[in-house]
Amino acid sequence: MVMLLIPLWVLQLHGSSFELGADVAIVSIAPMIFAIPIGAAADRLGSNRIVLIGSISAAVATMLSISVPNVWFFGLWQMLAGLGRSAAWIGAQTSVTRERNDVSRRAHRIGWLSVSAQVGNFGGPFLAGLLISRTSMTTTFLVSAAAIAAVAFSVTARDATVAAAKSKSSSSPAAAESEGRHFGRAYQLLILPSIRLSILGSIIRIALIAIRNSFYVVFLHHLGWSPLSIGIVLSLGSAASAGAAAMTGKLHRRFDDSRLLYVSLFSMAFVFILVPISPLFLLQAFCMIVFGIGNGVSQAALISLLSKGTPARDQGLAVGLRTTVNRAVQVTAPLLFGTLVTFVVLPTLIAGLGVVCLASLGGAAWFLRQSPESGPDNPRAL
């Protein structure tokens, strides 16, 4: 829901293109700074506690973000809400990537984590568009906050008790000493080829998603589309993502993660070249469905690469590192777009993003083509 609400709320407050880009970008500033410490906390304290704290804090900040009708106050509260949502997502990813005993079970859990995320993305935009049309933006924000808070109920009392026990057992001098070194240890993971590929893939994927969630919505709004129509198109893409994510278990048995990642990202980037061709609903729906399929496959492929290439004790750090990179892209991409749209028309910029991402994919494939794979599941380079 949030991906549709943020740009529409800024437009309702008569914010400029730069303010829109700034508010979309500012959501990711706090997660960009604190993702690695949160990942380290998930390794040390347990992922369930991180999910619990993140979801509750995100819900509160989402409600407070509309308490003052000001673009910059809205951005500040959304930054804190983004930190909470990122913490919950880091905890969830760490939980599934830590599965070491059964590779097929890990792939199954990763696939269903991706499905659950995409189902939320599917229902969110449609529900947001419907609520805006039938009620008001304020009501829609309150429903969004309630949906985020509901994630906390996925953590049972027993989970919290186990996490507390792990917290006490890990509060040793050695653990405290390592806290100051988790940034360095996280960046040392970049020597692993699978980690480098997952980071590069994340940059391209998140840049495309960030613009779809912000300036693509503005593009359709300027074409005269209603919030409900925009929500339907975005929801179609998310439904396709959920379906693709559900198929990742079978896909991973037939194709390797890197090949799935390249093909899925190529389809996502190529869609942006097609988007400005026509405002017809059928074309935009087709583009978002193709984008959604690539999104669902790429998300599972990235999580799988991260899991297979990272030592068990550093799973949270690896997730935190990837989240830091993701949030850095979510900060820079909307800001850059918000600045460039002053000089270049929006349809041209959207197509240009697709071209740049395709070129980046080609460069990544060329630079990493001879890198030996390594990690717990394939220990050759370390």
Image (cartoon, rainbow, N blue to C red):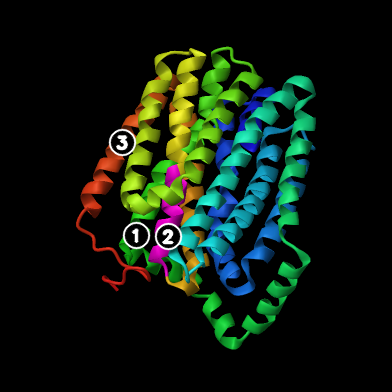
Residue 194: image tag: 1
Query: Of marks 3 and 1, which one's residue comes earlier in the chain?
Result: 1
Cβ–Cβ under 8 Å for marks 1 and 2: yes
Q: Neighbour class for label 1 at 10 Å: few (<14), some, many (≥20)?
A: many
Cβ–Cβ under 8 Å for marks 3 and 1: no
Q: Neighbour class for label 3 at 10 Å: few (<14), some, many (≥20)?
A: some
- Tag 2 secondary structure: helix
Is residue 206 something one can see in this rendering? no
Left or right of 206, for residue 360 = left
The amino acid beneath tag 2 is Leu
The amino acid beneath tag 3 is Leu
User: For the residues marked 3 and 1, what is the alpha-carbon distance in whole angstroms?
Assistant: 20 Å
- Residue 240 horizontal/vertical position (percent): 51, 34
Q: Provide the residue designation for mark 2.
A: 306
Q: Nearer the viewer, mark 3 or mark 1?
A: 1
Asked if residue 359 is positioned above or below residue 302 in the image, the reply reads above
Magenta-drawn segment:
297-310
Q: Provide the residue designation for mark 3.
A: 358
Residue reaching furthest bottom?
173
